[in-house]
Amino acid sequence: MLKRIETYYDAVPRSSARAEEFGPLTLFVREGEGWPFYARPAAGHEGEVPVAAVERVRARQRELGVPEAFEWVAETTPGLRAAVEASGLTVHEHPLMVLEGPGLAVPEPEGVTVRMVDAGDPGLESAVAAPYAAFGFPPEPGTAERTAGRITAGLTRLAAAFDEKADGGKGGVALAAGQYQPVGDVSEVVGVGTVPAARRRGLGLAVTAALVADARARGAELVFLSASDADVARLYGRLGFRTVATALIAEA
């Protein structure tokens, strides 16, 4: 299972980034506009990683003007954490969870409509913006257009919980949204967020359930996600996800 996830992690960035190899590490560099990528273990590498390799990647990231960031799975590449921490970066742990079974349905929260959002949906821009509002910053210009392109290309699927009455019936205002990114029969649920004023209503869980149902309907055999912390992991457990490993994110 973890090897399939590693293969997925190596494949996903390649649709919009170039890969620069640094021995045991690969740095993904975004092509064009959008959120910057990160470095992670080179495909198939499971051994130790020298501190010097981490420092070479960090120097390249500084040269490119992108965040000095690394992402990996602790159990798959156990030798990377010590090197990353020795280089001076802070490492954060997140439960890595895999869905067991088809996923459990949750009641749709009162007063909202949860639906998949396609490239031509009038609620697309609102759905793209909702997770950014949840995390406290606005989307970059062109984010909605880039997301529409990825949806059209089959690289991203988007779901949102809409207050249909908030804009006079023009598609609704998204109160929560999230995505999954399919690669073959593996999909990762990412970027689920609820705007602050609408939290504690179960909207994020409802959006995740919609994403899971859509992924399964489209042939996903392995669906996984990284929870922000143990409390959030317990919520995802209500949908049938279980923790199988630890996702690590390091940043300056």
Image: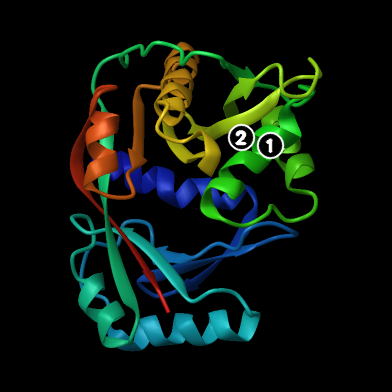
Q: Position of residue 171 (x, y in %)?
A: 76, 19
Mark 2 → mark 1, Cα distance in angstroms: 5 Å
Crowd rating for badge 1 (residues with CA inside 10 Å; few <14, some 14–19, many 20+) = some
| Amino acid type assigned to the residue bearing label 1 in the image | Arg
| Amino acid type assigned to the residue bearing label 2 in the image | Leu
| 2 and 1 marks in contact (CB < 8 Å) | yes
| Residue 86 shown left or right of residue 166 in the figure | left
Residue drawn at 70 percent across, 22 percent down? 118
Quarter of the picture holding the N terminus: top left
* Quadrant housing residue 136: bottom right
| Residue 62 shown left or right of residue 219 in the figure | right
Q: Is residue 243 above or below residue 138?
A: above
Residue receiving disc 1: 150
Residue situated in front as seen by the camera: 185 or 163: 163
Q: Position of residue 78 (x, y in %)?
A: 18, 65
Q: Is residue 19 above or below residue 183?
A: below
Quarter of the picture holding the C terminus: bottom left
Residue drawn at 61 percent across, 40 percent down? 130
- Looking at the rendered structure, the secondary structure element under dot 1 is helix
Q: Position of residue 151 (x, y in %)?
A: 68, 30
Q: Earlier in the sequence, mark 2 or mark 1?
A: 1
Q: Position of residue 187 (x, y in %)?
A: 43, 32
Residue receiving disc 2: 155
